[in-house]
Each structure stands twice: as structure tokens, then as C-alpha cells.
Amino acid sequence: MSCQTPIIVALDFPTRDAALALAGRLDPSSCRVKVGKELFTRCGPSIVEDLQAKDFEVFLDLKFHDIPNTTAMAVKAAAELGVWMVNVHCSGGLRMMQACREVLEQLAGARPLLIGVTVLTSMEQADLADLGLDIDPRQQVLRLAALAERAGLDGLVCSAQEASALKDQSPGLQLVTPGIRPAGSAADDQRRILTPGQAMAAGSDFLVIGRPISQAADPAGALAQVLTELG
Ligand SMILES: O=C(O)c1cc(=O)[nH]c(=O)n1[C@@H]1O[C@H](COP(=O)(O)O)[C@@H](O)[C@H]1O
């Protein structure tokens, strides 16, 4: 089933049962789902297959970051799982990202979208300074985006706060934006946030939403509310 909306729900749960329980309350035509480090480390590739069997397109969010060969082989393994989207850290460098793109080009049949993580949405300028990076997060995102574009990636993970500048600089890249918070909801550990409506207006292509949906008393209702906001 093809999804008709830009929403990707993060299934950040410690058990298969919890993840599948939430997926069972969602409609694969209304959202895609994201399997991240916690769920994948607990359950392994079979959780991806379980979600695909429920007709969900899966974003495998393992944020690979390693030497070019190791990362490319991990991306190949993800592609062979049939995921819809996979991501790597742009800070792994140009040759690493190129190796990932090349390995996907050699595969027969459908391949996942290859997305580069720029600056995590949990980080602000002081966090970059702690790393020795004397730069505004937006400038660092734009710099990494240019590298990802040179490597031939399909898109970026970034904050929606950078979406408009990125659409000017690199209009061909698809923008996947976490750090989405409906008005009035807690920011939690996120720092560079926008509401769903603001994010779409800024140029996001896909909105990753976790806790505002997964921890809601009525997750399907929370998703419906976001979709209503988007109109
Ligand atoms: O790659 C990601 O999906 C990601 C990148 C990023 O910069 N920030 C970020 O929050 N994420 C993921 O997006 C989800 C956001 O979840 P919530 O903060 O609960 O909405 C989590 O699963 C994060 O791992």
C-alpha cells in the first residue's frame, strides 16, 4: 500500500509487542514507520519484516557511520531487507557516502532512499562548540548538505528550521525532519523544533514524529490531529 501522507511515526519501543501494538492502531495509508536503534537492537531484522507484512513502508534509522566499505555493506544489507529509506551520517565523509550510493546503484530492482543525517535535532550551537565546531548549526547543516549532494544522496535528515535554506541551496534533496512538536507539546530532548504545519510550510518533505504520537493516550487520534493541521 502506498502512503499518502508525509508522516513517519518513530516506533521507539523496547519490545516487538509494543511496536506492533502501535502499528496495529495505525493505517499504512496514513503514515510510514521508523525502526530505530532501540527496537532494531532488541528485535533484529524480523521486526522490519513484521511491519512490512502489515503493509507499512519502513524507514530503517540506524544512522550508519563507519569506514566506506563497512557502511556501504550495511546499507546493502538494509536494501536487501526491502526498506523504503535508510540513513547514514554525513560526517562519515564524501567517500563514505559515495560508496553507499554506488552499492545501491549496483542492486537490481527497487532500492531505498539514501538519506544523510546532518546535525542531530537534539543539538544546538553550544553542543557543536563542545565538539570543537565553532559554527552555527544551520551553517554546519548547509555544509554537510553540499557534501551529501556531491555524493549523490537522495536527501537529508535535518531540522525543519533549516528546510527553507536547504531548499534554496539544494532543491533536489528530499528533507526528512524530526524535531516535530505539535503546539503545546513538550520538547523533550529536542532543541531545533517546529510544529507540523510550520515544518511543511518551510519545505519539509517528510515529518518524523515519535513521542507526540507514540506516548499519546490515543496515538491514532494524535496522528489524525497532525493530519488535520496539515489540511
Ligand atoms: O534520523 C532520525 O530519525 C533522527 C535524526 C535527528 O536529527 N533527530 C531525531 O530525533 N531523529 C529521530 O527521530 C525521532 C524523534 O522522536 P521524537 O523526539 O520522540 O519525536 C527519534 O526516533 C530520533 O532517533
Image (cartoon, grey):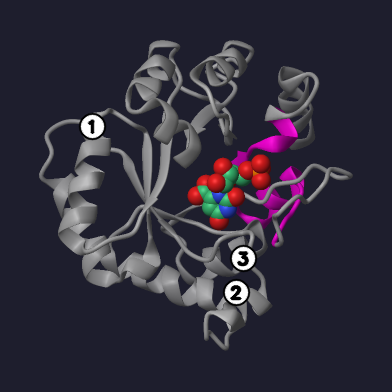
Q: Residue 164 falls in which quadrant of the image?
A: bottom right
Q: What amino acid type is highlighted by mark number 3?
A: Glu
Mark 3 closeness class: few <14, some 14–19, many ≥20 residues within 10 Å: many
| Element assignment for label 1 | loop
The local secondary structure at tag 2 comes to helix
Left or right: where does residue 110 sit relative to residue 115?
left
Q: Residue 204 location in percent, x, y?
A: 59, 51
Q: Position of residue 103 (x, y in %)?
A: 15, 49
What's the amino acid at mark 1?
Ala
Residue type pointed to by label 2: Arg
Q: Nearer the viewer, mark 1 or mark 2?
A: 2
Residues at discs 3 and 2 in contact (Cβ within 8 Å): yes
Does 114 sit above or below residue 97?
A: above
Mark number, residue 162: 3
Q: Quadrant of the N terminus?
A: top left
The answer to whether 161 is drawn above or below residue 88 in the figure is below
Tell me if 15 is positioned left or right of 97 in this view.
Answer: right
Q: Residue at x 62, y 74 (%)?
A: 127
Q: Quadrant of residue 230?
A: top right
Residue 25 forms part of the magenta stretch: no
Residue receiving disc 2: 138
Checking the image for residue 110, the label placed there is: 1
Q: Is residue 16 left or right of residue 228?
A: left
- Residue 191, quarter of picture: bottom right
Q: Earlier in the sequence, mark 1 or mark 2?
A: 1
Q: Residue 166: x and y, percent? A: 53, 66
Could you tell me which residue is drawn at 71 percent across and 18 percent down?
220
